[in-house]
Amino acid sequence: MPVISIAMLVGLMAMAALPPLNGFAGEWVIYQSFFRLGNSGAFVGRLLGPLLAVGLAVTGALAVMCMAKVYGVTFLGAPRTKEAENASCAPILMGVSVVALAICCVLGGGCRAVAAAR
């Protein structure tokens, strides 16, 4: 279960759009567009750009809190049923697939960072 737990943590962090994972790459592009909108010549753009960026930041904070709760209840909480008390490790193929997806989340964010640096 420790491997599944770490892979799930990586996936939840990606869903919460935390850097350096793939979820953050898309959110960063949205932040940049809001910042550019704030520097535009139009009054409405200068007003809405920062407000939209703050709204996205609040949404991101709520996502982080939700994902932390999901991880805490799933992996750190006390078992609620007899079946949960006697839980066994997942089959190897399930573990490999979850770890492969976690690696994709890390590589997706890393590739975006390399592309942005160019």
Image (cartoon, rainbow, N blue to C red):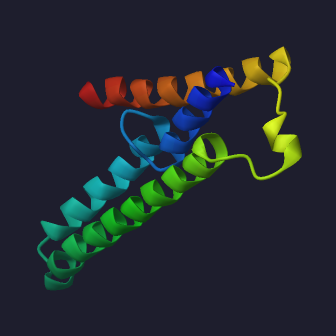
Quadrant in which the C terminus is drawn:
top left
| Horizontal side of residue 87 vs 44, given as left or right | right
Count the marks: how many? Answer: 0
Measured as percent of width and height from the top left, residue 11 is found at 57, 38
Give 74 or 39, whichever is nearer the viewer.
Answer: 74
| Horizontal side of residue 23 vs 102, given as left or right | left
**Residue drawn at point x = 31 percent, y = 63 percent:** 57
Q: Is residue 51 above or below residue 70?
A: below
Measured as percent of width and height from the top left, residue 32 is found at 26, 54
Measured as percent of width and height from the top left, residue 99 is found at 66, 22
**Residue drawn at point x = 39 percent, y = 59 percent:** 60
Give 8 or 33, whichever is nearer the viewer.
Answer: 8
Task: In the displayed orientation, state which residue is furthest to the bottom.
Answer: 44
| Horizontal side of residue 18 vs 90, given as left or right | left
Measured as percent of width and height from the top left, residue 70 is found at 59, 52
Residue 92 sits in quarter: top right
Q: Is residue 49 above or below residue 88?
A: below
Q: Is residue 49 above or below residue 64?
A: below
**Residue drawn at point x = 24 percent, y = 76 percent:** 51
Quadrant in which the N terminus is drawn:
top right
**Residue drawn at point x = 33 percent, y = 72 percent:** 55
Q: Is residue 33 above or below residue 29?
A: below
| Horizontal side of residue 43 vs 6, given as left or right | left
